[in-house]
Amino acid sequence: MELAMLAFERPAIDWHAFAPELVLLAVGSILTLIDIVYNERARRVMPALAAVGLLATLVPVLTLAVDGADRSMFDGAFVVDDMALTLKALFLISGFVVVLLSVDYIRDGDYHENEYYSLLLASLLGMVLIASSRDLITMFIALELLSIPAYMLAAWRKGGATSNEAGLKYYLMGVFASAIMLYGMSLIFGVSGSTQFDAIRVALDTGGDSAPMVTLGILFVLVGFGFKVSAVPFHTWAPDVYEGSPTPITAFLAVAAKAAGFVALLQLVFVAFSGRYDVVEPFFWIMAALTMTVGNLMALRQTNIVRMLAYSGVAQGGFMLAPFAVAGQATDSAIQAIVTYLIIYAFMNLGAFAVVLAVAKKTRSGEISSYAGLFSYAPGLAVAMTVFMAALAGIPPAGGWVAKLLVWRALLDASSVQGTVLAVVVAFNAVLAFSYYAKVLREMWMSDAPDGDTSPVSVSGTLTLALGLTVLATLAFGVFPQLAARFGDFSASFAL
Amino acid sequence: MQATGFDAWAVSLVVFLPLLGALVMLAVPSKEEETHKLIALVSSLGALAAGIYILVQFDYDNTSELQFLVDKSWIDVINSRFIVGVDGLSLPMLILSLVVVPLCIVYSWQHIPEPGNPKAFLMLILVLATGMNGTFVSHDLILFFVFFEIVLLPMYFMIGVWGGPERKYASLKFFLFTLFGSALMILSFLALFFVAEDPSGTALNTFDMRALSQWAGAGLSLTTAVVIFGGMFMGFGIKVPMFPFHTWLPDAHTQAPTVGSVILAAVLLKLGTYGFIRIALPILPRAAEQWAPWIGLLAVIGIIYGALGCLAQTDMKRLIAFSSVAHMGYVMLGISTLTTLGINAAVFGMVAHGLITGILFFVAGSVKERYHTLEIARLGGLLKAAPRMGWILGFATMASLGLPGLAGFWGEFPAILAAYQPAPALSEELFRVYMVIAALGTVLAAGYLLWLYQRTAFGEPTEEFADLEIADVNQYEWLAWTPFLLAILAFGVYPNLIFSLTDDTVGNIVSAFGG
């Protein structure tokens, strides 16, 4: 064998396309280095560095967006297009808000600070990468890159039993889901002979004789991601993990990690499996209907705000899964609905967690009843929470209504019986959901403060910034829906 | 034709000035209560001024044409546009809403209910005003939906924070009922977006009410149309409210603070009936013909049920609330006849009911404030204790029972008359039966209203309150109430003030029914 054949030949690399990942990697490495060199003395600057690093990562994302050209590398395994950029920006901004939420919590809780931010950035790197991955292996690596730091972050309150439980539970369920998913991927690879999504699509379109194997493979992969996005019946880990984790990490898991799962599902369903909508659609129909209904019914019974938000997140996930049920019949409007929902959901949910953090600082409690009389002593926080609850419930003019509207639109666009029935299921659930969001509103506005304690809540500068950002975005999306919806218009990205 | 110059801003001013006022109030500390009252009053009067400008500049020879029209892009991705304008159908409703809000603010000057906080209370009223005014001028289904929904949260808080002892239950019930209706309504709107197509078969894909009314369900299968109409029926019918969805209303009204009840009765309920006339009938006329007998049936059940409910009440405010169910029944009966006479009567009935029930709730609120109870059995002798208020109550009850010469008459009588000969597609026998039942309802109405008046106003004050000094109508109350009283009288004596406005628009709608 000639030596020349064995020599490694570097594939062409488009450095510009790779720039966001590289910048984020660099910032993460710098944080780790600073930690090694300066150790505890670096604690003060870590959150600021992480925040600046995330903003710096947005710069190449913006230059790529301005440039506008679609870029593809590594035989199509890594793609930069409008949708990838939009989702990267969403992850980075969510990460930025999570850093804002973390500053006080991590400092005051006397937890390890330096490693916290490095791990957060590592997880975000995985998310930024998953938005571009168009290949089973790249996607799996990105997924593990975002998950493994998250397992550790969930257990960051080392002293607390619940946090340890959260970390362990999240880890075990995550690994279990990965195993199922990998098995599915291996089946698909076996049939199609490729890990690359476009090639899989072509192979699945034509490979008729191995249909049962393909169906099994697709279902295993989708079930694996069902765990990641906490879809019913694979949701059981979510409430315990959310309740036990440090609250900023809960926000991170509920928003960014969930969005990452949806981003992967988008690529899989609309590219790799787009020839097999006959398998995908009924699967998602059942999962969506179950997820929103069970999530809402469970949320109704919660008395702890974080658990309630966890179940509400499950239910919201159900709304986001619904358009997948008409993936083949109304492809464009389904993609638009899911992406727009992800964008709006990120802001309204992060905002709700910001309020939870601010209030918990005073009340030291996660019970919904501890919100009693909030309007009388912290009207600003109460109004902000009202905006987020209204948004989550889908009441105009707060942003959430646009998200629900687009989901309904996608379901009806399919003009099929299944689509219409699911739309009605969504409608019933939307009403059901309001009754538990109203619980919080009722406590805040209509009940008296417990023990007459109306001392004001002190809200730190970073939390105020996070609240300001999320309130503004939530209201702006509601009043000028075009702002969010235009980012969901990706008919071009999936033009096959 | 789009409006230009100031005309292009007039409708937007009407809608958004109150919201602007609320935003300004946000910046003012809540201690400065007088400033808040002033800002609220000024911004609502500003909106009224813009409304009066529209009233003056309105082209009364073309009442069916959309005037002060603005058509701008809004949500391009779903082709929903910011289309606002005023025609003969929206104008009376808009003016009603514009007049009621500042009067409610004037009334609130001295009557901020427990637990106080005029800043928040008045801000909610202003947000409500934006929602209500916006609903009456929108001509895009999504825009309409947004304004229709914006009123929910302020009213929820108004009942829930400033309401009576059962306020938490009542506010949630109000919200969930309405939300359920509007969730189905928006599904119907979206369905229209996809099913409407022009004669050549290309999809219209629009939420523009003008285009959809022109399409009017052409080529759509009757079953689909009936189902889509059903979604809208739920949305509008719950808001009206029609029997059997009316149960939220007595609770909401009884628990709401006075001003909340007034706004709820005077304007919010009309959003539902307005929706029927503006959206449901013109866009799906064939389905409307299928639904009309059922709507008529529910309407007459509402009339009788509401009246019987009234007779069973011991609480004055709850009685007025049940009378709303009955009165809205006449409005819906008028609509269900699908005739020019019936729908004109319905629009008149909407305005008249708004004014009459509004003043009734005002008086009930003031009575409650003075006696600290609305238990009819404990009241009595109002004419002796506070003669002016007693006479105003008498005037309002007379108007409410439909005395000719006052506004209430012109909403009820033509609606009953219209049922004698409904649109050609409807069964004459059936609607004549409805007519008889509705006529019986007026007798019952006279019964419960006179009974109410007799027990509260006649005779001597009860022992319990015999020694109590009851203040008569004060200046704020005079200021807030006089316009109501004058309008009830004016519309009663010269109903053509409204009929001449609505007639052409209604005629256009009814032309689809061959009426």
Image (cartoon, rainbow, N blue to C red):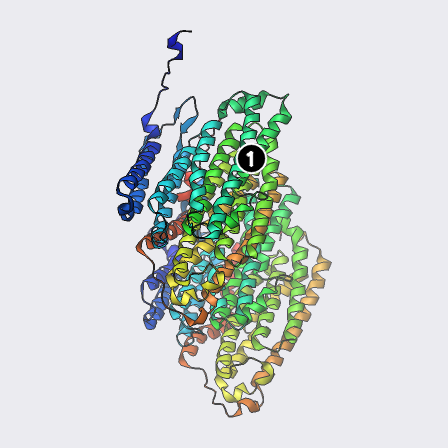
Residue at 64 percent across and 21 percent down: it is A209
Mark 1 is surrounded, within 10 Å at the Cα level, by few (under 14), some (14 to 19) or many (20 or more) other residues, namely many
Question: Which residue lies most toward the right here?
Answer: B429
Residue A239 image offset from top left, x and y in percent: 52, 50
Looking at the image, is B263 positioned above or below residue A352?
A: below
Residue B469 image offset from top left, x and y in percent: 47, 89
Question: Which residue lies most toward the top here?
Answer: A1
What subunit carries mark 1?
A: A
Q: Quadrant of residue B198?
A: top right
Looking at the image, is A134 positioned above or below residue A122?
A: above
Residue type indicated by callout 1: Leu
Residue labelled with disc 1: A222
Looking at the image, is B388 positioned above or below residue B41?
A: below
Q: Quadrant of residue B203?
A: top right
SS at badge 1: helix
Near-viewer residue (A483 or A463): A463
Q: State left or right for residue B35 relative to residue B416.
A: left
Near-viewer residue (B232 or B491): B232
Q: Is residue B46 visible?
A: yes
Residue B1 image offset from top left, x and y in percent: 41, 47
Residue B349 image offset from top left, x and y in percent: 56, 65
Q: How many marks?
A: 1
Q: Quadrant for the N terminus of chain A, please.
A: top left
Q: Is residue B205 visible?
A: no
